[in-house]
Each structure stands twice: as structure tokens, then as C-alpha cells.
């Protein structure tokens, strides 16, 4: 038999095709098919193009067949000994990512693959001079395997309340929502800043290209105060040029009109100054007797449902990387998105 030619005897071809169909390893499947096509007289370049592999892979597979037959096609990585990346190593990387890199005596606070490799080597060596060293490609596979991602950090402020007091307040608010009488309404309230300067966010881009987002230079701001119904998620909102007590009071007026049939309107909101200003308290005492305010613990924006259910989606769909030239165009886009959101909720409720 010549070195470059493969001959399959009897039912050998059907057997290799059957093994290829059953193979769970894509690379092993390709190796089986390389042998079959080689026996059919296909050239190296034709096989590589048909199977989406390199000509070197075809030549290497042919050599393995000539050297060891069918057994030569099997994965031989088990001969390499104990794998470097085991469950303990993956657990170590997962543990490292729970903390900033600076906690491990690095100058920079953020992780790179190189820092992860070096730190994992240090800790996997048990304090000695050894340790597991992996390539950047392998570290990339480890990170993908545990679902790690590169994202922006989120700024937070510490809540001055004790954990027990915070839990009690949040439990009371959940009970309020869960046991709300039919003649009462409950809404989550918050304000959002709309900036003409676009928020810069992630986007898909072609290799070697970076999307450009034009900024107006001088920023212009508008504000939206929103109230999301705790039962239906529908939104009532008010717009303004300033984030002050007047904006909040405009929202409360719209709530009184939107819930004219409700005896009480419970408003869950944060501790922003306009929510408890002298002007707000005076208006509530005179005209807002049906409204009851329930304040969240300080510095707990994630516990306000409107923040993550409405404003986050608003920014992702409208203000991030936007190309509007004027604040009026941007606010028109914001209003359209809010209207379409309410319309979608109405259609969903009808379908249910």
C-alpha cells in the first residue's frame, strides 16, 4: 500500500460512516470522513474544503490511519496524563473572580487573562514554587465554561440601615403589594435622567471596526418621573425640564386622574429629597389625601422594581448609543417607547 493511498476492505467503509454518524466528538467525526473520502480517491485539498478543515489535518489523519489503523483515529489526549484544568482549578478561577485583582497584590483592580493565569498558578501551587500554568486560550475556555463575562462595574452606596431593619421594611412592602385590596392601587415610583449626550454601551461590530457615536458636545437634560403599577406593570409618567418637587407633584396629579376609582394609592419610592420636600408635603396635605407614600431603605435602587423593569430597558432601547441631534427628538423617542410598552402590556393581558 502506498503511503498516500487508503484502501478500505469489505464493509469497512460502511462501518466508518456508521461510526461517523454516531460520533459525539466533531473532530473524531471529521477524521472518520477523511479516511472514507481518501479511500474514494479524493485529494487533500478537496477533502479539506468539503469538511471545513485544514489540509494539514487531512495529511495528519491519513498518517495516523497508516500508522495505527482505526485506533489511530481516536482521541489520544488521555495519554497526556492528568489534565491541568480540573474541577479544582475551575473552582479556583471562580473564587478569584469574586474579588478585585488588587486584593491579590496586583497594581490594577481589574482582571486580565494574564493576571488570572498568574494568580491561579500561585494559588494552585499550594504556596510553593510550582503551580498550574495554562495558556490564554485555555483560560478563555475556562472563563466561557463558567459563564464569566466582561462587563461594566456598577457603583453602589452602602445602606446606613442595619440588615435586619432593611429586611423588615422590604418585607412590609412585599406584603403590601401581595395583599392589596381591589379598591386600592400600588405603584413603584422613580425618576430617570434623559441626557442628549448618549450613554455608551456594548454593540456587535465587525472585526477591525469600531462603531462611532456622535456626541453633541454640550449636554442637555430632561427628566421623566414614572409610576409603574404593581399589578399590571403599566406606566404613568410626567416629563419635565427640572428634577424638582414640581415634577413629582405633576406625577402625583396624573396618578389621581389615572386611579380615580381607587380609594387609596400606595406609592413606593426612594428617599430622594423632592419626595419629602416642604412643597410636596404641603400639596399632599391639601390635595393628595388618597396618596400614601412608602419609602424604601436608603441607597437600595435595585429594590425599586421600576428601576430594573422600566428605566434599564428604556436606556438599552432608546438612549444608549443614540443618534438624535436634539433633546426634543430624543424625548419624542422616549415617549414613543413608553407608549409602545404600555400598548404591548395591554395586548398581552388581552391574549391571556
Image (spheres, grey):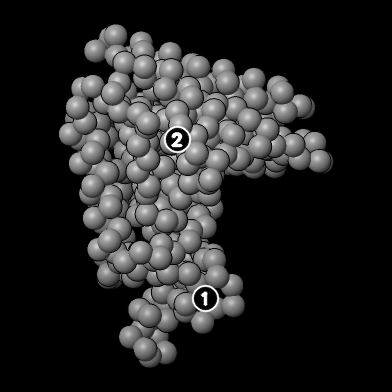
Residue at the limit of the structure toward the front, as seen here: 286
- x and y percent of residue 312 in the render? 49, 37
Q: Residues within 10 Å of mark 1 (few under 14, many from 20)?
A: few
Q: Which mark is residue 277?
A: none
Asked which secondary structure carries label 2, the reply is helix
Instruction: Determine if residue 88 is in view.
Output: yes
- The residue at 17%/34% (across/down) is 179
* Up-down relation of residue 197 to residue 237 (above or below): below
As drawn, is 342 to the left or to the right of 243?
left
86 sits to left or right of 255:
left
Q: Distance between the residues labelled 2 and 1?
A: 50 Å
Side of 134 where 266 appears, left or right? left
Q: In which quarter of the image is residue 332?
A: top right
Residue at image mark 1: 102
Q: Can residue 44 be seen here?
A: no
Q: Which mark identifies residue 284?
A: 2
**Residue beneath the point at 37% across and 31% down:** 289
Q: Nearer the viewer, mark 2 or mark 1?
A: 2
| Residue at horizontal 19 percent and vertical 27 percent from the top | 181
Amino acid at each position: 500500500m502506498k503511503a498516500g493511498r487508503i484502501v478500505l476492505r469489505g464493509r469497512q467503509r460502511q462501518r466508518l460512516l456508521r461510526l461517523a454518524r454516531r460520533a459525539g466528538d466533531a473532530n473524531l467525526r471529521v477524521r472518520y470522513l477523511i479516511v472514507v473520502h481518501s479511500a474514494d480517491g479524493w485529494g487533500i485539498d478537496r477533502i479539506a474544503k468539503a469538511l471545513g478543515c485544514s489540509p494539514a489535518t487531512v495529511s495528519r489523519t491519513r498518517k495516523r490511519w497508516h500508522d495505527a489503523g482505526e485506533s489511530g483515529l481516536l482521541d489520544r489526549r488521555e495519554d497526556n496524563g492528568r489534565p491541568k484544568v480540573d474541577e479544582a482549578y475551575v473552582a479556583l478561577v471562580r473564587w478569584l473572580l469574586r474579588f478585585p485583582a488588587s486584593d491579590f497584590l496586583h497594581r490594577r483592580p481589574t482582571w486580565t487573562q494574564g493576571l488570572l493565569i498568574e494568580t491561579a498558578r500561585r494559588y494552585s501551587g499550594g504556596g510553593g514554587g510550582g503551580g498550574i500554568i495554562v495558556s490564554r486560550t485555555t483560560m478563555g475556555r475556562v472563563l466561557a465554561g463558567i459563564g464569566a463575562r466582561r462587563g461594566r462595574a456598577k457603583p453602589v452606596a452602602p445602606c446606613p440601615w442595619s440588615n435586619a431593619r432593611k429586611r423588615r421594611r422590604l418585607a412590609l412592602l412585599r406584603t403590601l403589594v401581595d395583599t392589596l385590596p381591589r379598591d386600592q392601587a400600588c405603584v413603584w415610583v422613580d425618576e430617570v435622567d434623559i441626557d442628549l449626550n448618549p450613554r455608551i454601551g456594548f454593540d456587535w461590530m465587525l472585526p477591525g471596526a469600531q462603531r462611532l457615536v456622535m456626541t453633541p458636545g454640550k449636554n442637555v437634560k430632561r427628566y421623566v418621573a414614572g409610576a409603574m403599577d404593581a399589578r399590571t406593570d403599566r406606566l404613568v409618567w410626567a416629563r419635565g425640564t427640572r428634577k424638582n418637587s414640581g415634577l413629582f407633584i405633576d406625577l402625583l396629579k396624573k396618578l389621581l386622574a389615572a386611579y380615580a376609582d381607587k380609594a387609596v394609592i400606595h406609592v413606593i419610592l426612594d428617599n430622594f429629597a423632592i419626595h419629602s420636600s416642604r412643597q410636596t408635603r404641603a400639596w399632599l396635605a391639601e390635595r393628595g389625601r388618597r396618596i400614601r407614600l412608602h419609602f424604601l431603605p436608603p441607597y437600595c435602587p435595585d429594590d425599586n422594581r421600576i428601576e430594573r423593569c422600566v428605566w434599564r430597558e428604556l436606556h438599552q432601547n432608546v438612549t444608549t448609543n443614540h443618534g438624535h441631534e436634539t433633546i426634543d427628538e430624543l424625548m419624542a423617542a422616549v415617549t414613543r417607547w413608553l407608549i409602545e410598552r404600555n400598548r404591548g402590556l395591554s395586548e398581552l393581558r388581552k391574549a391571556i
